[in-house]
Amino acid sequence: MEFMAIGIVENGIHDIHKHDWDEVESKIILKPEYKGGLKGLEEFSHVEILFFLHMVKYDRESDLLGRARRNAGNPLVGIFSRRTNHRPNGIGLTVAKILEVGDDYLLLQGLDAVHGTAILDIKPYTPRVGEDAIKIPDWAKQNR
């Protein structure tokens, strides 16, 4: 299985430590062969961004089970119940707010990816269920 980057993140953040990602503005610069591929995206408010977590590694022994945000008050849960960046396949997924759409770039707010991150895909965010139908445990609502 192989993936190729369609673009790269520019935002000036070079470390993976906790940031207030909701406030971070990032620009995705598309590779030249994808110029024009964002046409129509300006009609959406948000996008789903798939990206490669190149600065973190998954260690089964330490990452398979853990506590969300490493908070001792949170329950011990599995890797697929948390939004940690230590993923088995190193794939990140974020819903981010669109600030501006260009021919070959996308300006976003809330993308939790560092400068230089490879973008794998961009999709318009179209919720499939209503917000009132979404179930989230209390521990996962903290610092959302």
Image: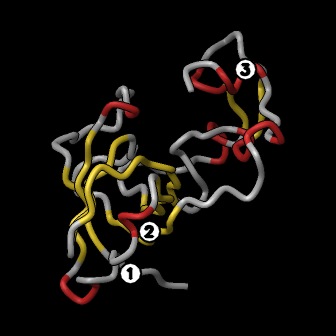
Q: Residue at x 44, y 53 (%)?
A: 45
| Left or right: 105 in relation to 53 | left
The residue type indicated by label 2 comes to: Ile
The residue type indicated by label 3 comes to: Trp
Q: Give the numbered dot on residue 139.
A: 3
- Answer few, some or many: residues within 10 Å of disc 1's Cα (few below 14, many 20 plus, some between 14 and 19): few
Q: Check contact, mark 1 vs mark 2: CB within 8 A.
A: no
Where the C terminus falls, by quadrant?
top right
Q: Nearer the viewer, mark 1 or mark 2?
A: 2
* Residue found at the far front of this picture: 43
- Answer few, some or many: residues within 10 Å of disc 2's Cα (few below 14, many 20 plus, some between 14 and 19): many
Quick check: 134 above or below 122? above
- Answer few, some or many: residues within 10 Å of disc 3's Cα (few below 14, many 20 plus, some between 14 and 19): some
Mark 1 and mark 2 lie on one chain; the one further toward the N terminus is 1
Mark 1 and mark 3 lie on one chain; the one further toward the N terminus is 1
Disc 3 element? helix
Disc 1 element? loop
Task: Residue 66: give x, y in percent of width and height.
Answer: 68, 30
Q: Check contact, mark 2 vs mark 3: CB within 8 A.
A: no
Disc 2 element? strand
Mark 2 and mark 3 lie on one chain; the one further toward the N terminus is 2
Q: Residue at x 51, y 44 (%)?
A: 85
The residue type indicated by label 1 comes to: Met
> Which residue position holds label 1?
4
> Which residue position holds label 2?
122
Quick check: 136 above or below 31? above
Q: Residue at x 28, y 71 (%)?
A: 7
